[in-house]
Amino acid sequence: MAYFLYGDNFMRFTQSLRKNRQFQEVYKKGVSRANRYLVMYVLENHQDENLLGISVSKKVGNSVVRHRVKRLVKESYRLHEDIFNSGLNIVITARASAASISFEQMESAVLHLGRLHHIMKEETKTECEADQSN
């Protein structure tokens, strides 16, 4: 697990998928679930940590918009990384409708897909469901 020093605190890097063959393996062998804004593919990697890959096509918008969507997805995942089960390769693909959503909507979309895949830790699922019912 990689860490970096931020002020006096250590913060963890989110490990990511980088190679095309890693993405292709998740697309071919993984399970996909989708909502209005995102598609999430999940495949077990038999490691101690998750690897995250983010894909945003040119259909979403120009490079500024695509980069913003990537940042929103990455931050949404990073904030809740500890509530996801470990040992997974996760690829999140943005749909064109993701171009204009807020951070709160993106965060909700990522957590929704985590629940659909059943990859969130049990105690967290009930907390998220309770928060949404209020």
Image (spheres, helix red, strand yellow):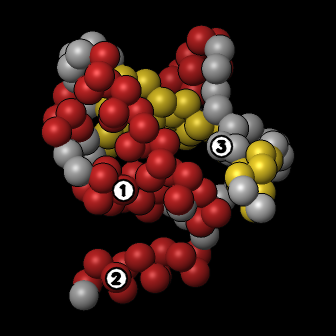
Q: Which quadrant of the figure contains the C terminus?
A: bottom left
- Local packing at callout 3 (Cα closer than 10 Å; few below 14, some 14-19, many 20+) is some
User: Please, what secondary structure does the residue beneath circle 1 have?
Assistant: helix
List the residue tagged with mark 3.
14
Label total for image? 3
Q: Specify the amino acid type for callout 2.
A: Asp
Confirm whether residue 49 shows in the render: no
Which percent across, then down, holds residue 48?
82, 49
Label 3 and label 2: CA atoms lie apart by: 26 Å
From the viewer's perspective, is 80 left or right of 88?
A: left
Which percent across, then down, holds residue 65?
26, 26
Q: Specify the amino acid type for callout 1.
A: Glu
User: In terms of depth relative to the viewer, which is nearer, 74 or 24?
Assistant: 74
Q: Is residue 9 above or below residue 36?
A: below
User: In terms of depth relative to the viewer, which is nearer, 85 or 94?
Assistant: 94
Query: Which label's residue is closer to the chain start, 2 or 1?
Result: 1
Quarter of the figure with residue 112: bottom left
Q: Are marks 2 and 1 in contact (CB under 8 Å)?
A: no
Which percent across, then down, holds residue 101?
20, 45
Label 3 and label 1: CA atoms lie apart by: 16 Å
List the residue tagged with mark 1.
107
From the viewer's perspective, is 108 left or right of 16?
A: left
Query: Which label's residue is closer to the chain start, 3 or 1?
Result: 3
Confirm whether residue 58 shows in the render: yes
The image's mark for residue 131 is 2
